[in-house]
Image (spheres, helix red, strand yellow):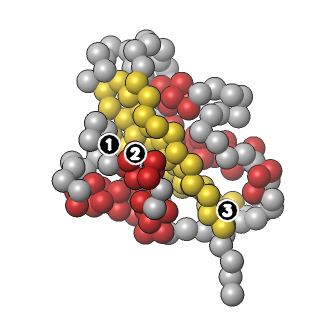
Amino acid sequence: MRKALAVVVLAAGIGAGSAFSAPGRPATPLGSLERGVLADINAYRVANHLPALQLSASLTSAARTHSLQMESDGYFAHDSADGTAFWRRIESFYPAGGFAYWSVGENLLWSSPDVDAKKALDMWIASPEHRKNMLDPNWREIGVSAVHRVGAPGVYHGLAVTIVTTDFGVRR
């Protein structure tokens, strides 16, 4: 019998009005797990009478950078390893400048040894805060990242892990 460990974390949506910005970075193509997570979240939203989210290259770059940082540095949190708030990190990829309204949110999970898209969605649905984030009617865009590492350091205790980050956003 194979034991699995999964942890989910949520960062509620944050609105900001600052003009902090950095140039967008191109996202690499989505892998199969990432495509599945995107499809499943959108199907869940549509089933709940909400519009599907558009994939954002900037939010995907933010999500991927965070997943990779957590994987390499062996930590699991919304804030960056240097303590930067999650929304500031996302804002460096998805600038608020020039928009009257800007808001972002984030769902995280890690699972050992791995997770599929359906299980990721089920874990988030089982958590009221994650479910609320996925069903926020304000979101218009999403970025998705999933990374896998065998022998992950730090909080992962050398386990094989898959880390999934979804960054939600709206600018208008």
Answer yes or no: do the residues labelled 2 and 1 have beta carbons within 8 Å?
Answer: yes
Vertical arrangement, residue 20 with respect to residue 72, above or below: above
Labelled disc at residue 107: none
Residue lying at 69% horizontally and 28% vertically, measured from the top left:
83
Quadrant of residue 133 within the rendered picture: top left
**In the shown orientation, is residue 86 left or right of residue 159?**
left
Which residue ends up furthest to the left in the rendered image?
A: 49
**Residue 102, x across and y down, in percent:** 35, 24
Amino acid bearing label 1: Asp
- Which quadrant is the C terminus positioned in? top left
Report the Cα–Cα distance between label 3 and label 2: 24 Å
Nearer mark to the viewer, of 3 and 1:
1
Amino acid bearing label 3: Val
Quadrant of residue 69 within the rendered picture: top right
The residue labelled by disc 2 is 133
| Frontmost residue, 74 versus 33 | 74
Quadrant of residue 45 within the rendered picture: bottom left
Residue lying at 65% horizontally and 33% vertically, measured from the top left:
80
**In the shown orientation, is residue 83 left or right of residue 144?**
right
| Frontmost residue, 126 versus 122 | 126
User: Is residue 171 shown to the viewer in this render?
Assistant: yes
Residue lying at 48% horizontally and 14% vertically, measured from the top left:
20
The first of marks 3 and 1 along the sequence is 1
**Residue 113, x across and y down, in percent:** 66, 69
Which residue ends up furthest to the front in the rendered image?
A: 128
Q: Neighbour class for label 3 at 10 Å: few (<14), some, many (≥20)?
A: many
Element on which disc 3 rests: strand
Labelled disc at residue 161: 3
**Residue 53, x across and y down, in percent:** 29, 46
The residue labelled by disc 1 is 136
Nearer mark to the viewer, of 3 and 2:
2
